[in-house]
Amino acid sequence: MEKGDEVKKGQALASLDLREYKKTLEKKLRDYSKTRWDFEQYRDDYDVVGELDKNILTDAEKRILEKSQFDLDKAVLDVELTDIALKNATLISPITGEVTDIGDLVAGENTNTLTNPANITAIDFNSLIFQARVEEVDLAHIKPGQKAVVTLDAYPDEKFEGEVLQINRVTQKNVVGGTIIPVDIKLDTNEKFIVGLNGDVQILIEEKRDSLIVPRRAVHREDDSHFVWVVKNGKPEKQTITVGLLFGTMPAMRAAKLDPIDALRYE
C-alpha cells in the first residue's frame, strides 16, 4: 500500500502479524474441544439427561456438573474473543477512494499499535465537502438544497458550483468570539480540489429580479411605507420603495422610478 493507490470499500489496507492470532485461536478451539468432552463425560457419568433440578443428585455432584458448565461457557467466550481479535487485526477501508497518507508504515515491518500507532488516510475525492461558516444572524435564510458558488483562494478567477448539503447542529466560535454555524456545501467533482483549501461561498437564498441593493441607513420609514432620498438635478427627491430580502446590512428594494445609476442621499 502506497500513497496514491486506489482502494475499494471493504479492502484490506494493513494488518498486524496474524500468525500469533491464528495460533491462539487454534489453541482456544482445542481447549474448547477438551472442555466440551469433559462436560459431556460428566453428564454421562452422572446419567444427566435434562436439567439438573430434574435429577436426583447430591450437592457435590451438582457442583461438579455446574463447574463443568461454567468451564464450557468460559471456553466458548475465549474462542469468541480470540476470533474478534483476529478480525480486528486487519485494517479495512470504510470507503472507496485514494490513499493520501500511510504515516511511517513500511510493508513487511511490524508495528506496535500501543507505543507507535500509525494511521492510513484514504479520501473519496468524488464527495468532497466545502465547510462554510455562517453567522448566526444569517442562519434563518439557509436551507439544504440551496444553490451555492464557491471561490477558492488558490483559484480566485474560477467559480465552483455546489449546493447546501447540511447545516451542522453544533455552533463554533470565530476569532473574535462570535457564534458561527458550520454549513456543508457539496461541490461538483473537480480534479483541482485539494483537501484543506480556503475560500468563500455565496449561497443563493432567493432570486429576485429587477431589484437593487442599498445600504440600510439609506432606507427611511414613514407610517407603513419605506422611502429613500434620490438626488435629482442636485436636489433630494423622496422615492417610495418596496423592501424585500436583506443581505447582511444591505436590503434589496424595488421602486418604479429608481435607476441603478441614481445617487442616494443618506447619512
Image (cartoon, grey):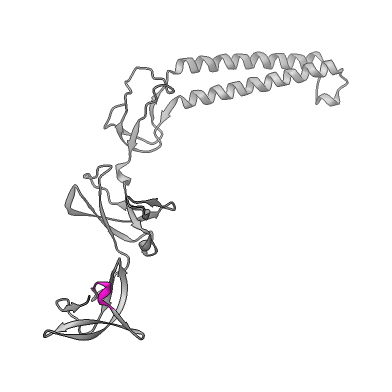
Which quarter of the picture shows residue 161? bottom left
What is the x, y in percent for residue 254?
26, 79
Q: Which residues are magenta?
A: 213-219
Q: Residue furthest front?
A: 267
Q: Where, quadrant-wise, is the N terminus in this rendering? A: top left
Relative to 205, say whether 238 is above or below. below
Left or right: residue 254 compared with residue 115 = left
In the image, is 233 to the left or to the right of 139?
left
Comparing 145 with 183, the one in front is 183
Residue 207, above or below 113: below
Asked whether 179 falls inside the magenta stretch, the response is no
**Residue 135 in view here:** yes
Quarter that holds the C terminus: bottom left
Residue 227: image x %, image y %?
Answer: 27, 82
Q: Residue furthest left?
A: 233
Residue 167 picture location, percent across and down: 40, 55
Residue closest to the eye, 8 or 80: 80
Above/below status of 168 relative to 213? above
The reply to whether residue 142 is visible in this rendering is: no
Q: Nearer the viewer, residue 257 or 99?
A: 257
Look at 27% across and 48% down and name the residue there: 189
Disc tally is 0
Q: Which quadrant would residue 140 be assigned to in this image?
A: bottom left
**x then y, percent, for residue 263:** 16, 78
Residue name at image x 68 percent, y 20 percent? 72
Q: Residue at x 28, y 51 (%)?
A: 188
